[in-house]
Amino acid sequence: MKKILVLFSHPKFEKSRANAVLIDQIIDKEGVTLHDLYERYPDFNIDVNKEKELLDNHDVIIWHHPLYWYSCPPLMKQWIDMVLEFNWAYGPKGEALKGKTCLNVITTGGSRDVYCSEGTNSFTITQFLRPFEQTANLCGMAYLPPFAVMGTHNLNDEQLTEHANQYSKLIDLLQQDFNLGNGNGCAFLNDIEQLKRS
């Protein structure tokens, strides 16, 4: 069974109903390490060696965060800047992450229809996440489409629970090394048929 590291970054987690439901669903899953960056590093003083050790010991890396101003919260960006060092994560001798799988799990206040060329945000989620995709590419990781819970302010408890169940099923598939390919042409992993089956 593949080991999964969920790098969770949310500066206002205590106020996030959607993320609380998602995290609740996966926190006790075997083979899953939930690593809450804001809880671990409230002073932003990241232990780079410890983070590298965590990465070494996992097969799948999930960047789980709200979409803040079309990117991630600042501590996750600092984590990327500091931990993914030259000649460790990338560069001529940087092969520590080669062959691992990587993806974003995100929550957004805006619904899917505002994330397109005709919508108020002008670009798709995939376009906003390009820096993450290229980071994964540079580090030799296989990057999957995101799992996204969108329009969170308008979701009822039943809808949030369904998203959390899908997240749990996604974790199961990733642990089983199920071939998700490039997401089977889906913009979001939520849309893969295996996640919709009960």
Image: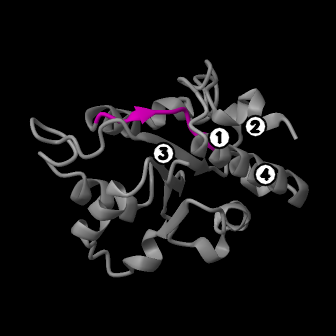
Q: Which residues are magenta?
A: 140-148
Badge 4 is on which residue?
165
Amino acid under label 4?
Asn
Q: Residues within 10 Å of mark 3 (few under 14, many from 20)?
A: some
Amino acid under label 3?
Tyr
Q: Do callouts 1 and 4 mark residues in contact (Cβ within 8 Å)?
A: no
* Mark 4 or mark 2, earlier in chain: 4
* Mark 1 or mark 4, earlier in chain: 4
Q: Do callouts 3 and 2 mark residues in contact (Cβ within 8 Å)?
A: no
Badge 1 is on which residue?
173
Q: Of residues 142 and 149, which is closer to you in this image?
A: 142
* Mark 2 or mark 1, earlier in chain: 1
Amino acid under label 1?
Leu
Q: Is residue 78 left or right of residue 2?
A: left
Name the secondary structure under disc 2: helix
Q: Nearer the viewer, mark 3 or mark 2?
A: 2
Q: Residues within 10 Å of mark 1 (few under 14, many from 20)?
A: some
Question: Residue lying farthest bottom?
Answer: 43
Name the secondary structure under disc 3: loop
* Mark 3 or mark 1, earlier in chain: 3
The location of residue 36, given as percent across then percent down, is 49, 70
